[in-house]
Amino acid sequence: MKDRNLTAAQFKKTSALLPRMTGKNIALARRVLVDGDTFRAVATDAGCHPSNVSKVVRKFYNVYLDHILGCPEDWYQVSVCLPTKKAAAEVRKFEREALREFKRSSSGLI
């Protein structure tokens, strides 16, 4: 998974936010995100299809992006004062769209 590796500490923090994810799925995600194994190898060992592994990893990584990472690498965080609620809503909308596009491009896992 290109540039989507997590450290063991990042992985542990993220897994704590997923109490309903099964231990098996957490182990699958760890093999891809921390150990660097391929979807195909993990799926073969687990007896499932690579797309199943991809879904688990995507869900895990999106939780990481939303709750652990905060501002993506090479992005800039700014604070602004705006004159109207409409202007503030437009800025929030732009931020949501940019993050959604970042997640979409980051989640092209398979």
Image: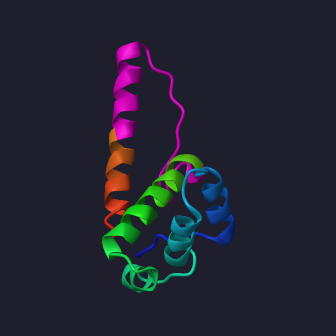
Image check: 43 left or right of 29? Answer: left
Image check: 7 left or right of 25? Answer: right
Above or below, 40 relative to 75:
below
Q: Nearer the viewer, residue 3 or 48?
A: 48
Q: Residue at x 50, y 22 (%)?
A: 81
Residue 65: horizontal and vertical position, in percent?
Answer: 50, 53
Image check: 49 left or right of 37? Answer: left
Image check: 94 left or right of 83? Answer: left
Whether residue 5 is visible here, answered yes or no, is: no
Colour pattern: rainbow
Q: Which residues are magenta?
A: 68-96
Q: Residue at x 37, y 76 (%)?
A: 48
Residue 88: horizontal and vertical position, in percent?
Answer: 41, 22
Residue 17: horizontal and vertical position, in percent?
Answer: 61, 50
Q: Nearer the viewer, residue 1 or 53?
A: 53
Residue 69: horizontal and vertical position, in percent?
Answer: 57, 54
Q: Nearer the viewer, residue 74 or 70?
A: 70
Q: Residue at x 32, y 55 (%)?
A: 104
Position of the N terminus, as image quadrant, is bottom left
Q: Quadrant of residue 52?
A: bottom left
